[in-house]
Image (cartoon, rainbow, N blue to C red):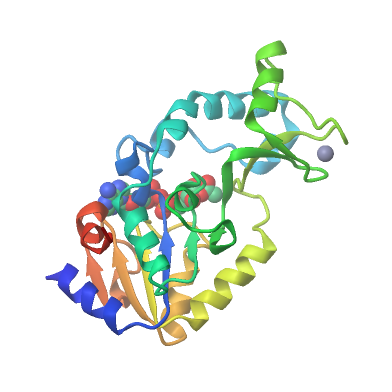
Amino acid sequence: SGVERLGEMIAEARVIVPFTGAGISTECGIPDFRSPGGIWTRNRPIPFDEFVASQEARDESWRRRFAMEEVFAAAKPGRGHRALASLYRAGKVSAVITQNIDNLHQASGFAGEHVIELHGNTTYARCIGCGQAYPLDWVRHRFDGDGLAPNCSACDEPVKTATISFGQMMPDDEMQRATALSQACDLFIAIGSSLVVWPAAGFPMMAKNAGARLVIINREPTEQDDIADLVIHDDIGEALGPFVAN
Ligand code: OAD
Ligand code: ZN
């Protein structure tokens, strides 16, 4: 079966780089973006330039974020996260590249510096001007006070979740580290991503072109299935559950 073949490929690999999307967190209660019921089937994205230009867009953005707070706060790592953490502890995986913002790789046991967050992190906020970090409670307190998304105490620019929106610059350091990891691994496993959002979706192909074996685990077909060495169209918990140690 596909899972047995994956087990062989993991055993044969020296350096494995997992690359994750929202599909790894759906069993944790966090919706993905493009499945039925996904975030982008319910809300249109608020592009970065709109967030910068419009107080109403910022208010809406924070309303959406706080509406999700209970979901994020209750979420625990799933079988996929735990399987990757097991491979990390075993020394097979040195770091995970993720498009996810939910902090669940860290919660599963990855050290912060070994989670390459291409699209940032939604568990805290940042000023878009000076970069000052803020806890979400700081934002919540102000937002609940006057109903307005707050600006930075230091520079008065808008404060945003520490995530990357459409039209916002990708983080330089993370892009460089993801590039280096993709080019140095011998097994790259794309997990739970539709692989349609670039530049993130370029990493599987980059790894393949640099000589790695490529595995794609996703319920739905992806645009890159045809370049993969192994495709598993199954539930991630089922496919990776066997690799959770103890
Ligand atoms: P998508 O919602 O585009 O894709 C998630 C994929 O996971 C879908 O193809 C699902 O079929 C699959 N899936 C969901 N649950 C699964 C499960 N339990 N088992 C197996 N497969 C499952 O999410 P991403 O590819 O992560 O970026 O989206 C990429 C980016 O688009 C996000 O990082 C976000 C979004 O816009 C920004 O906002 C910048
Ligand atoms: Zn600031």
Q: Residue furthest bottom?
A: 211
177 w.r.t. 80: above or below: below
Q: Quadrant of ligand 2?
A: top right
Pinpoint residue 52: horizontal percent, then vertical percent: 73, 37
As drawn, the residue found furthest toward the left would be: 1
Above or below for 83 versus 155: below
Task: Tell me residue 166's x, y (percent).
Answer: 59, 48
Residue 187, quarter of picture? bottom left
- 54 vs 169, nearest the viewer: 169
Residue in view at x 55 percent, y 61 percent? 116
Q: Nearer the viewer, residue 221 or 2?
A: 2
Quarter location, residue 219? bottom left
Residue 35 in view (yes/no): no
Which residue lies at the image location 34% right of the left edge and 76% below the top edge? Answer: 214
Residue 152 relative to residue 31: left or right: right
**Looking at this view, is 53 or 81 the one in front?**
81
Q: Nearer the viewer, residue 142 or 193?
A: 142
- Direction front: furthest residue: 246
On the image, the x and y values in percent for residue 82 come to 34, 55
Using residue 95 as the reference point, say whether residue 246 is left or right of it. left
**Which residue shows up at 48% across the image and 58% down it?**
110
User: Given the current orientation, which residue lies at the most extreme right position?
Assistant: 155
Which quadrant, please, contains the N terminus?
Answer: bottom left
Q: How many marks are shown on the rendered structure? A: 0
In this rendering, position of residue 173 left or right of residue 216? right
Vertical placement of 132 versus 194: above or below?
above
Which residue is painted at 26% across and 58% down in the image? 246
Can the viewer see residue 37? yes
Where residue 220 appears, as percent x and y from the top left, is 25, 55
